[in-house]
Image (cartoon, rainbow, N blue to C red):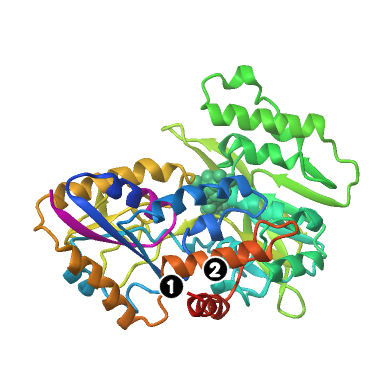
Amino acid sequence: MTRACVAVIGSGPAAFYATAALLRAEDPLVHVDVYEKLPTPWGLVRSGVAPDHPKIKNVGATFAKTADHERFRFFGNVEFGRDVSRAELLERYDAIVYAVGAKSDNHLGIPGEDLPGSIAATDFVGWYNGHPDFRDFAVDLSSERAVVIGAGNVALDVARMLVTDTEVLAGTDTADHALAALQASKVREVVVVARRGPVQGAFTTQELRELGELDDVDCVLDPADLVGLTPDALTDAPHTVRTNLEAMRRLVADHPPTGRPRRLVLRFARSPIEIRPDAAGHVGEIVLGHNDLVTGDDGTVRAQDNGLRETLSTGLVIRAVGYRGVALPEVAFDQRRGVIPNSAGRVIGGDREYVAGWIKRGPSGVIGTNRKDGQETAEAALAELAHRPDRDPAAIAGLADWVRQRCPDVVEELDWRAIDRHEIASGAGGRPRVKLCTVAEMLDVVGTARAGR
Ligand code: NAP
């Protein structure tokens, strides 16, 4: 039996599922060091999943078990490419697994997209979830209507956050700065704009059903959008399409608008054409183009502009049209697809390098999708690790000293647990936790905890 040592870059679901699969191997015995830019682990489970979806976050408990493993170490507050380089890690580890997700966003490519008041869902999500990079992000909630572009789950998350009763949000781990801003919000209507039809929506059914359960919110959907989309007409459609349509039919039938204080409108077959400024140069209105849905020879349904236009006044446009991967220093990258080019998780042209999650396959799928994905990556790595020379356990242990010297503010597993305990204790009295939203605050808590150890 031999020992190997692997550096995993990133600490979200893809990183943890790949790590768990590596730790399960019996020969070679793999030691895993997870390097994370933030002092806190769990990636989008902490900073992506909507605060009103606490059950989805329970997967953190599974990751915490993996982190308890004797061959696991966490090196947080260490940025790949800034604090440690690819070459340095390749020199010290048998393999590197990149699991950094897709932190940027797709653009619409329309005039006015960069006006103040037009923002990316990725930034808005980071803001309400307390990601330190977005602690001071300015979100203008002073207009009555917000427009969200996109027909995926992120669009629904964002829309829900804007109309959910803040008394409900006050019982979640929504970041304090976001909670205060949402409590003062003037937004009363959120229009979610989908360029194609209800059949082509990228939503999942549970997320659609939840719209009917929002207190004091009219969920508005034009029944004309559902005409002809009966169960009989859709027998060949995928299961999710059929359940989505059933959820939409129920929204129309069971939740007719009654003039509740807030509205969430689902608008189909509309594309953003232009965002226009108000007199102050801030987002003032958005022009939507009407689309016809055209089926191509391959069966794909396309949105085709039919020339009709409508204008909605709004002070906030949020584009939720997909995440996008960002290149890592010195690591191969496919600019067009926004992924690290790979074959079943092995980096093409790489040197003992592997990739997992959204930076491997693109930004799609739910958290659980990463289990199989991580397993595949781990298997690819294990096949190569089996041929590496045996590692001396003392040398593996010594790697921690190298990291500590290089990054005096490294946040290790015990430190993160102190942050975790602090946040949970701060939430006692009705919230799962109160998130620390700056690195400085987190390091303060770490310093206090270390002094007491
Ligand atoms: P997504 O599911 O890929 O949806 C992106 C949406 O943007 C699609 O409706 C797409 O429409 C639309 N779009 C793309 N370009 C556009 C353009 N130029 N103009 C107008 N619309 C445009 O992406 P996502 O919502 O960011 O979600 C990413 C992944 O995370 C998904 O797998 C999602 O299910 C998952 N997620 C899950 C949850 C959950 O489980 N609760 C929550 C959040 C995210 P077309 O289809 O016409 O291209």
Q: Is residue 129 visible?
A: no
Spatial separation of the CA atoms under disc 2 and disc 1 = 10 Å
- Given the image, on which type of amino acid does mark 1 rest? Val
Q: Which one is in front, 388 or 300?
A: 388
Which residue occupies 84% across, 36% down?
Answer: 256
The amino acid pointed to by label 2 is: Ile
Against 80, residue 225 (above or below) is above
Residue 90 appears in which quarter of the rendering? bottom left
Q: Which residues are magenta?
A: 1-17
Task: Identify the residue position indicated by label 1 in the image.
Answer: 411
Q: In what element is the residue under mark 2? A: helix
Mark 1 packing: few (<14 Cα in 10 Å), some, or many (20+)? many
Whether label 2 lies within 8 Å of ligand 1 gets the answer no
Few, some or many residues within 10 Å of mark 2 (<14, 14–19, 20+): many
View extreme (top): residue: 232
Residue furthest right as drawn: 259
In the image, 290 versus 419, the foreground residue is 419
| Residue 171: assigned label | none
Residue 404 sits in quarter: bottom left
Q: State yes or no: discs 2 and 1 in contact (Cβ < 8 Å).
A: yes
Residue 416 in picture, x, y percent from top left: 48, 67
Residue 47 in the image: above or below residue 441? above
Residue 313 sits inside the magenta stretch: no
Q: Which residue is mark 2?
A: 419
Vertical position of residue 194 compared to residue 169: above or below: above
Q: Farthest front residue?
A: 453
Whether residue 15 is in magenta: the answer is yes
The picture quadrant where one finds residue 425 is bottom right
